[in-house]
Amino acid sequence: DTFYSILKSIKPDYVRLSFAAELKVLVAKTLDITVEELEAQKENYRHYLIFAGKIFREYDKEFWVNQLLYDGPVVYKDMPDKIVITDCRYANELRVLKHFCDYNNYKFIDLGISVDKYTLLDRGYNEGIYNSDSETLIDNKSLSASISNVGTKELFLQNIQEFIRVYGL
């Protein structure tokens, strides 16, 4: 979500949507905590989020993308003009989003944020979570664009500014 925070500071007309928004509500209710508490200690609860996400994906592979586009708080007919979806992690969800954008004449850029394992571990991720399929299934090499988030926040900002320039956002 660092990407979105930086993008929003540069381009305030972008709106963030997330597969995990409804997932976080579900997990927070199950654990009898608030979404804010879950967010504040996300690394402590990440395994619950991964587990619950997998359960619903086993029920329906497109459950979370359909929730986002058709059943969520901002459904497709009310979709803002400029959106960023910060947590697409599965190729089938990426395909559904691309089809949705093509069908509705939205510009679609599938951007990966590359961070090496050791940087993530330094930032507090645990190795088990780093290796989960929700973190490793989409290969950045297959995406239209990829920017690096290895290094300082200032370097990441420069990478985002270059992305904005190249893609005319």
Image: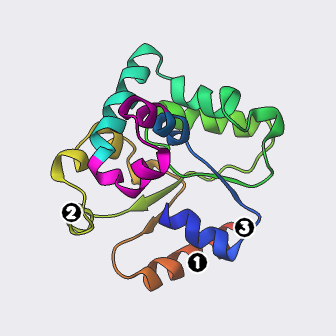
Question: Is-magenta flag for residue 105?
Answer: no
For the residues marked 1 and 3, what is the alpha-carbon distance in whole angstroms?
Answer: 10 Å
Q: Which disc number belongs to residue 162?
A: 1
Disc 3: CA contacts within 10 A as few (<14), some (14-19) or many (>=20): few
- Amino acid on which disc 3 is placed: Leu
Q: Residue at x 80, y 51 (%)?
A: 81
Relative image position of residue 11 (x, y in whole percent): 71, 71
Relative image position of residue 74 (x, y in whole percent): 73, 38
Mark nearer the viewer, 2 or 1? 2
Q: Which disc number belongs to residue 18?
A: none
Relative to 27, 19 lies left or right: right
Q: Residue at x 27, y 49 (%)?
A: 44
Relative image position of residue 149 (x, y in whole percent): 40, 70
Pointer 1 or 3: first along the chain: 1
Residue corresponding to mark 3: 169
Magenta segment main secondary structure: helix
- Amino acid on which disc 2 is placed: Leu
Q: Which residues are magenta?
A: 26-44
Residue corresponding to mark 2: 121
Pointer 2 or 3: first along the chain: 2
Q: Residue at x 51, y 77 (%)?
A: 159
